[in-house]
Amino acid sequence: MSQNFKDLFPHEITLGIIGGTGLYHISDSPELSEMLEFVEEIPVVETPYGNTSSPIYIYKTLKTKNTFYVSFLARHGLDHKYSPTTVPYRANIAALKRLKTKNILSFSSVGSLKQECKPTDFVLPDQLIDLTKGLREHSYFNETGIVGHISFGDPFSLELRKFLISCNEQIKNYSQTLHENGIVFCMEGPQFSTRAESLMYKRIGGEDAKCINMSCIPESKLAKELEINYQIVCMITDYDSWRLDDKAVDIQEVIKNLKENNQNAKVFISNVVSFLDSIDTSVGQKLKGNTLNSISVKNIEHVKHGNQFLSDDGKKRLDYIFPEW
């Protein structure tokens, strides 16, 4: 039986943070300890879509005019037991929605497809190309009786991306290199690209090809379906395999840059948290209502309770992610 979040945590989450490879905690950050106070650990959450990959840690802001709540979840588990293919994406995003999360900031280690996008740089892309192989559950609306077709032309939130850039630009002596916009490719993994594949991605994306990762699909799609603003922050660890004069990327090269990237991620989060007073006006909730309008049924009023084609389990799952329907 899934947990009742009304009993677990009564406040909405303004910013939900998903940590990627190497980023398993934020409580150990000196920068963030001055900005956030730990409030509660919600144990691994049982949802109708399975269990979340880690507990969800809740914090409240200390230096904002108003009090905001921030959550953290480790995508691959605290001990990195989930591969990119086996991450329980639907459970993770459903739990964040149930906690009334308004915005998701998702960190991911990536390979660079562009010379000027260097290891330890960050990229905030505006587009993606899906190279996964259909092994992952990628929708909440792909069963008999409840078919939804959300708009995915803009996979990431423009407003949230602009807000993140603005927050970090306003911090004096902030030296992290941020690349805005461009394409992130999402491949299946867990193996890295062949040289031929890496070169192909560069040709497909042209000048806009920035980086490649293994986790923003289906995470970004699921967040969009649940009307949560979502932006991936790509933390570059390597140059993938397209530079023919270099050795092909391997895990040792990735690990070499993880520590610096994860420290930089915590500074990035600290900068964003310091400006949360303006996030509602800067970002807003423009996705609200989009999902209901995307569902293909003859009578939209009967999408859930009067839908004879939707199973009882399907209705329970829908109640979990959209109780307001």
Image (cartoon, helix red, strand yellow):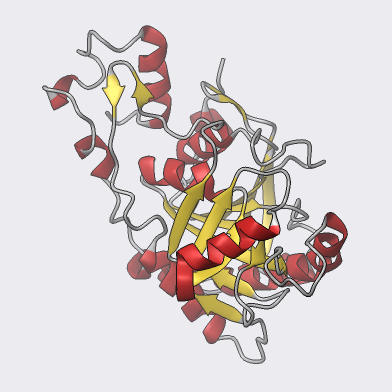
* Tally of marks: 0
Residue 77: x and y, percent? 74, 40
Image quarter in which the N terminus is found:
top right
The answer to whether one can see residue 67 in this image is no
Left/right placement of residue 106 relative to residue 181 reads right
In the image, is residue 162 above or below residue 153?
A: below
Q: Is residue 75 visible?
A: yes
Q: Quadrant of residue 264?
A: bottom right
- Percent x, y of residue 258: 79, 63
Extreme residue in the left direction? 298
Question: What's the residue at 67%, 67% (across, down)?
Answer: 242
Query: In the image, is 260 to the left or to the right of 6?
Result: right
Rendered position, 298 above or below 17:
above
Q: Residue at x 65, y 86 (%)?
A: 174
Q: Is residue 257 above or below residue 54?
A: below
Q: Residue at x 68, y 68 (%)?
A: 236
